Amino acid sequence: MSTIEVHVPDIGDFESVEIIEVLVAVGDKIAEEDSLITVESDKASMEIPSPASGTVTSIKVAVGDSIAQGTLVLMMDTADSTDAAPAAEPVKDQAPAAEAVKETAPAAASFAGDVDVSADVVVLGSGPGGYTAAFRAADLGKNVILIEKEDVLGGVCLNVGCIPSKALLHVAEVVSEANEFEELGIKYNKPKINTDKLRAHKDGVIGKLTTGLKGMAKQRKVTTIHGFGKFTSANTIEVEAADGSKKTVGFENCIIAAGSSVTKLPFIPWEDERVWDSTDALELHNIPRRLLVVGGGIIGLEMATVYSALGAKVTVVELSPGLIPGADRDLIRPFEKTLKTRYENIYTSTKVTELTPTKKGIVCKFEGTKAPAEDTFDNVLVAIGRSPNGKLIDADKAGVVVNDHGFIPVDTQMRTNVNNIFAIGDVVGQPMLAHKATHEAKIAAEVIDGQKRFFDARVIPSVCYTDPEVAWVGQTEEQLKADGVEYEKGAFPWAASGRALSVGATNGVTKVLYDAKTHRMIGAGIFGKNAGELIAEAALAIEMGAEMDDVAMTIHPHPTLSETLNFATEVAEGTCTDIYMPKKK
Amino acid sequence: MSEMVEVKVPDIGDFDSVEIIEILVAVGDQIAEEDSLITVESDKASMEIPSSHAGTVKEIKVNIGDTIAEGAVVVVVEASAAAAPAPAVEVVEAPKEAAPVEVAKPAPAAIPDIATKPSPTANINPVSFKNAHASPAVRKFARDLGVDLSKLGGTGRNERIVKEDVQAFVKKVMSTGGGSVNGGSALGVEAMPDIDYSQFGEVEIKPLSKINKLTGKFLHRNWVTIPHVTQFDEADITSLEAFRKKSNTEYEKEGVKFTMLVFIMKAVAAGLKKYPRFNASLEPSGENLILKNYFNIGVAVDTPDGLVVPVVRDVDKKSLVEISKELREISVKAREKKLKPSDMQGGSMSISSLGGIGGTNFTPIVNAPEVAILGVSKAEMKPVWNGSEFEPKLMCPLALSYDHRVVDGADGARFITYVSHLLADARRLLL
């Protein structure tokens, strides 16, 4: 270990330059060529690099000094093996910062009266939006408390939504495919299904993720409090734990990520165990012989996929004229065609008027042209939608506006009408999707950090993880027609894709929609295997303002399903050679 | 007995659309013809739209924030001349019913906050921003710098906005010294402290009128961005005043009253003809001077809501009688808030006359994009040395403020001397 002097090197023909910034501090460990100071002449500014590696022991210059070649800048110890000592120092540096945070906490306490704990940022709800907001805020140096009403973190998505359903859907896909292999000359025996083991697998997936979250919260020093949080003022939330004990949590800023709950219509006999909501369905209590799924939206159809693959005869009933309202019909028609071969019945434009539990099963009365007057099912899954939890958290006590539907209105920075309270995810509006929530979560956390963030995303993709999948992003053709926007369309049937043929996905279709004037992509829809994975490219294309040629001229790997986006674009352009098209222009 | 009438936006001048900033009536209100229905705002001023019919308001078809144009339906009125007593009862009842509903609602009081909260980038339209041809990374970069992407063109392929375009835009704004964010910080000046004045004694908070706010903004901009010089002079108006009084008696029967301002307007128009640089505007780029071949004079009018500057057109071509009549009409219109935005546009130069009130002199602020303004104070009898003795002369103080980027000091002195010269013997206006 030796001490060396660092001097200003040759800086060109300047007599003297002024120091405008000192970039290192005593104790800093620096590498050779790391910048030490910034100097400025009347022409430009430049940084003076270190000639050696080592630890800074003293600094001989200050901001504002004029220096010239040869001026002593600082002293440093050149040492190669003292890594441990300097490494400890940043930790020391953190300690005062933490104390400073603690000092601000009592100020909030005196404001609110009696606060048990308090933080810079309190996040209400630990779903994908909530934990993302909490972790991002913590990573930005905030002191964070995360409040969760359940015993585990992760919210609906991780525990009773996206993740467990995908664990089961994967199983369903493999079972269905194995079944289809008989046609290819490979016959498997009929699968024996052990629901306990399958449930354990699903719970295992959830467990890994929630444990991971818990660990990450700990690493980030995010305090988690379990209990039902309700506002008591614009700076306090009272949390009631499962055992009835109460805690008052104070905050400078709050992010409401309270999510949504299953919409419960009053005429449904929820007290009967054979009537399920999506959470019950994910529990795999039993595999019914005949299952009625009320609601032909994403959630209902995903669960229908699972139970159908596990052996149940599924009937789907939907109030609107088609399944998955919101997606374009030219994607849904082949989807419905596929489902009709697998499910016992699909009743669209049909209303369920009564569900009566009897010994034989649940008797359901229908109102619709094609449905019978009534039918009996072993189980009924009601999946007619989700309602925001805005009204459950006493938001009014904080002065936060909640609309009649239970949504909390926010501005483009995710701020509610109360300056220090933000809201994200399902509770602020449709679409109720985890990937929307996580995007909003980061905006809220960064705005609290003083960054200029806004929700400037153009599109939010939607995916129905059925077998096969349906995915769409941006404008649908129906919207474009309704808005009178001139567009150009290209659709590519997967029957012309070599890869689709080889993986038995010939029923798929990829559609792209381009603005007729700018030729930029404004929407896309995919029906078929892995549509959810494929739609991401379209989302990126729309955000980047990609034109037809950008997508058409990007070389896609062959043979893949991703090619279909490229082909569909070529169809729109009239340059596709993989299908025969009559001359366009 | 009654008839439903749609009340539409009348001709509001050459504006494609104006924004509604206030709705002055409610459903059930009994209104008279010419009662104001809504207040709209252009970039110049605000004006009230009057009702074309009397009756009871049945339906309001517009909202605050809507942009409307000529022909848009504002309200539906049940036009009934004889049914006055009945609606009168309704009018009393309606607000009574409405009030308790609001009180009963547990909704917190701070509802309008989302809309009114001042955000540093409140002027950026989120939809046009996110649809500007720029990638998410460039959108994020623009947000950091507070740049509205819908306001700049791109240099990338097919006008894609790239990071460099955002940087270039910011550089341009900074170098043109526009003070785009707000005047204070752009000038590097401390912001005004927020003081609780109630600690010194009783205070009252009165919101600024729309006009106050608008003129405040423009005056501030003009004050900090235009290098002003003010040139003073006194015009001998002894003989002109005698002529004015005589003319007033002669024209009394016709209802015409000449004010000194009318003569000054005429003199200023003559001054503009002789010195065309005063009848000009500077291009925002600073590259060109736009010389005008019309002679429209703006006149500052004091109204209860604040200052407005309507413009009298073609002063050079009109007779004093015509100008007098027009000036009177325009002042009445201004006080009744009936001025159209187009009435306040297209001025060559403005005159601010405080002669009727008093004071010896003042420095007016140039009404940009015009480059000069003449301030007129109260005329007074003064002893003037005629070479052998003091003579009593009626002297009118004049103050000419001008944009020094366009007008040189010598020209400023020439212009004001010429105007004084004309006023000293108004017959010169005929020459």
Image (cartoon, rainbow, N blue to C red):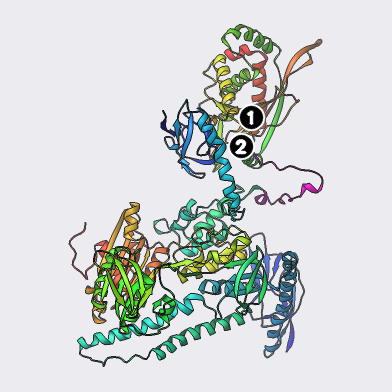
Which residue lies at the image location 69% right of the left edge and 15% below the top edge? B237
Give the labeled residue for mark 2. B211
Q: Is residue A333 left or right of residue B23?
A: left
Where's residue B211, x and y in %? 61, 37
Q: Which chain letter matches label 1?
A: B
> How packed is label 1: few (under 14 Cα within 10 Å), some, or many (20 or more)?
some
Q: Is residue A47 left or right of residue A325?
A: right
When the figure is inspected, residue B74 is found, relative to residue A506, above or below; the finding is above
Where, by quadrant of the figure, is residue B299 drawn? top right
Q: Is residue B386 visible?
A: no
**Is-magenta flag for residue B190?**
yes
Q: Are marks 1 and 2 on the same chain?
A: yes
Give the labeled residue for mark 1. B303
Q: Are marks 1 and 2 in contact (CB under 8 Å)?
A: yes
Q: Is residue A406 left or right of residue B248?
A: left
Using the image as rendered, state which of residue A181 and residue A204 is in the foreground: A204
**Is-magenta flag for residue B323?**
no
**Amino acid type of disc 1?**
Thr
* Mark 1 element type: strand
Work out whether mark 1 precedes mark 2 in sequence or the reverse, and give the earlier one: 2
Which range of residues does the magenta coloring cover? Answer: B184-209
Where's residue A474, x and y in %? 38, 62
When the figure is inspected, residue A550 is found, relative to residue B105, above or below; the finding is below
Instruction: Work out which quarter of the rendered image holds the C terminus of chain A and state it.
Output: bottom left
Where, by quadrant of the figure, is residue B240 drawn? top right
Using the image as rendered, state which of residue A86 and residue A290 is in the foreground: A290
